[in-house]
Image: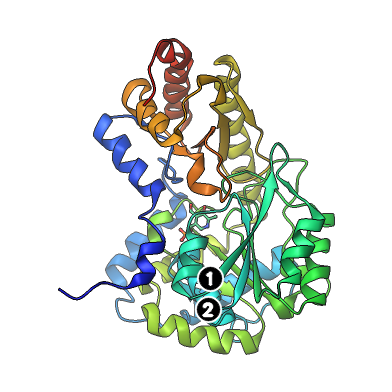
């Protein structure tokens, strides 16, 4: 049999998605893969019911249905303060996942370098390998996950084509400050580098932190490829609706990549999602209040269980320190946790370039009763871990 592509030997299947299968096998509460166990807003359910019957059922315009792009541009202009033109600045994609791949293939040639902060969302390394780019890692150091300005300067000195910025950040929950973003912007300008942002958690930020759109910083629109999606904001991860927003010259190229990758996102769901994009500011305030409560409930259980963690400022993940259990392998610990305690998380090592194996990432995008169930199980962790001989 012929050999499959050598590219695929440089990354494994997703650890996050594998932990979901482990959770299912052991009947564990699944706090690994970040998706809600509650319904999207009623207005979306009704719209999907309608478009399921009335259509459209055929391909939309490849870079996005006109009314979806118009609604998206209106909403993103409102939140970013940028005059986003639905015909010039937007490609609608199958989630931010596709938007990121499109952005990487649009910005980079094989052999180009790309700065990736570590810890990182695991897709970025696969995106880099698939587009032939080589990552330069820059550490975000716990507890506040700040970068060392000199390390970042040195990374830029290697002449990267792009920097990937996940803000708010998965897995760390970091929300980059204005000062940090301006420092990145200054280096990007000096070294003529693209900035590819992944802002899927743009509306999940905890007061007093605020999300700042990188593209809205002075002079940054022309070099920023902003990727985001409707998945997290409207609790519709399965609808696969995302977008890339950038300057017209970038978008003209990105549309070609997108067209040949997927042709387009689901037409009936684009039509249905127009309703979500027109929701008033109160929706976003309620979303923040909802996640603020979920964070409080889950962190309370971690406190009760005596576990230490870094308090997230954004997104819906928390990194819990399992160092005290002296397990040398966080993958083995995560599997034991799912099997014995009945809570599934993701081994932290899958997010780090550095040899970090004392963290487990949990997400709290769950109903309060699910979080209480998981939290109660975690209260028994220490007792169950007593006397365990780790592999
Ligand atoms: C940082 C980040 N980007 C992208 C995604 C996937 O987003 P989408 O559903 O829009 O493809 C996730 C999902 O967990 C994520 O955490």
Question: In this picture, is 62 found above or below 371?
Answer: below
Residue sitting at x 30%, y 66%:
52
Q: Quadrant of the C terminus?
A: top left
Q: Quadrant of residue 156?
A: bottom right
Image-based side of 274 in relation to 193, left or right: left
In the foreground, 25 or 192 = 192
**How busy is the neighbourhood of tag 1: few (under 14 within 10 Å), some, or many (20 plus)?**
many
Q: Position of residue 297 (x, y in %)?
A: 57, 26
Q: Position of residue 81 (x, y in %)?
A: 76, 68
Give the residue pinned by disc 2.
91
Image-based side of 154 in relation to 98, left or right: right
Q: Quadrant of the N terminus?
A: bottom left
Image-based side of 345 in relation to 211, left or right: left
The numbered disc on residue 243 is: 1
Residue sitting at x 67%, y 83%:
247
In the structure shown, which secondary structural element does the residue marked by tag 2 occupy?
A: strand
Q: Earlier in the sequence, mark 1 or mark 2?
A: 2
Image-based side of 379 in relation to 83, left or right: left
Q: Quadrant of residue 29?
A: top left
**How busy is the neighbourhood of tag 2: few (under 14 within 10 Å), some, or many (20 plus)?**
many
Q: Position of residue 112 (x, y in %)?
A: 59, 77
All told, the count of numbered labels is 2
Q: Position of residue 287 (x, y in %)?
A: 59, 45
Residue sitting at x 39%, y 54%:
45
In the structure shown, which secondary structural element does the residue marked by tag 1 occupy?
A: strand
User: Can residue 162 be seen here?
Assistant: yes
Query: Label 1, label 2: how many angstroms apart (C-alpha)?
Result: 6 Å
The numbered disc on residue 126 is: none
């Amino acid at each position: 049999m012929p050999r499959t592509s050598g590219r695929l030997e440089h990354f494994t299947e997703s650890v996050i998605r594998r932990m979901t299968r482990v959770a299912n096998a052991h009947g564990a509460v699944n706090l690994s893969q970040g998706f809600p166990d509650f319904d999207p807003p009623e207005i979306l359910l009704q719209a999907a019911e309608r478009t399921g019957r009335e259509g459209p059922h055929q391909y939309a315009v490849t870079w996005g249905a006109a009314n979806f792009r118009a609604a998206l541009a209106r909403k993103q202009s409102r939140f970013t303060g940028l005059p986003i033109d639905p015909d010039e600045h937007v490609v609608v994609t199958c989630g931010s996942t596709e938007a990121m791949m499109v952005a990487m293939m649009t910005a980079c040639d094989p052999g180009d370098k790309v700065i990736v902060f570590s810890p990182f969302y695991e897709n970025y390394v696969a995106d880099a390998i698939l587009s032939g780019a080589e990552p330069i890692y820059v550490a975000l150091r716990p507890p506040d996950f700040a970068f060392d300005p000199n390390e970042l300067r040195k990374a830029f000195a290697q002449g990267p084509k792009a920097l990937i910025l996940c803000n708010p950040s998965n897995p760390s929950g970091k929300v980059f400050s204005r000062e940090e973003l301006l420092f990145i912007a200054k280096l990007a300008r000096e070294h003529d580098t693209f900035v590819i942002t992944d802002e899927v958690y743009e509306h999940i930020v905890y007061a007093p932190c605020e999300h700042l759109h990188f593209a809205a910083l002075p002079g940054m629109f022309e070099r920023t490829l902003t990727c985001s999606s409707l998945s997290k904001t409207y609790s519709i991860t399965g609808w696969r609706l995302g977008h890339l927003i950038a300057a017209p010259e970038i978008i003209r190229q990105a549309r070609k990549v997108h067209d040949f990758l997927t042709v387009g996102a689901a037409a009936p769901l684009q039509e249905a999602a127009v309703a979500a994009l027109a929701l008033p500011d109160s929706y976003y305030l309620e979303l923040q209040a909802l996640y603020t409560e979920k964070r409080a409930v889950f962190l309370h259980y971690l406190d009760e269980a005596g576990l230490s963690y870094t308090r997230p400022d954004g997104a819906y993940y928390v990194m819990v320190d399992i160092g005290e259990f002296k397990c040398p392998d966080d993958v083995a610990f995560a599997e034991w946790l799912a099997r014995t305690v009945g809570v599934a998380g993701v081994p932290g090592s899958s997010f780090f370039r550095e040899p970090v194996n004392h963290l487990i990432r949990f997400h709290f995008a769950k109903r309060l009763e699910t979080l209480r169930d998981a939290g109660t199980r975690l209260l028994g962790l220490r007792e169950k871990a007593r006397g365990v001989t780790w592999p």
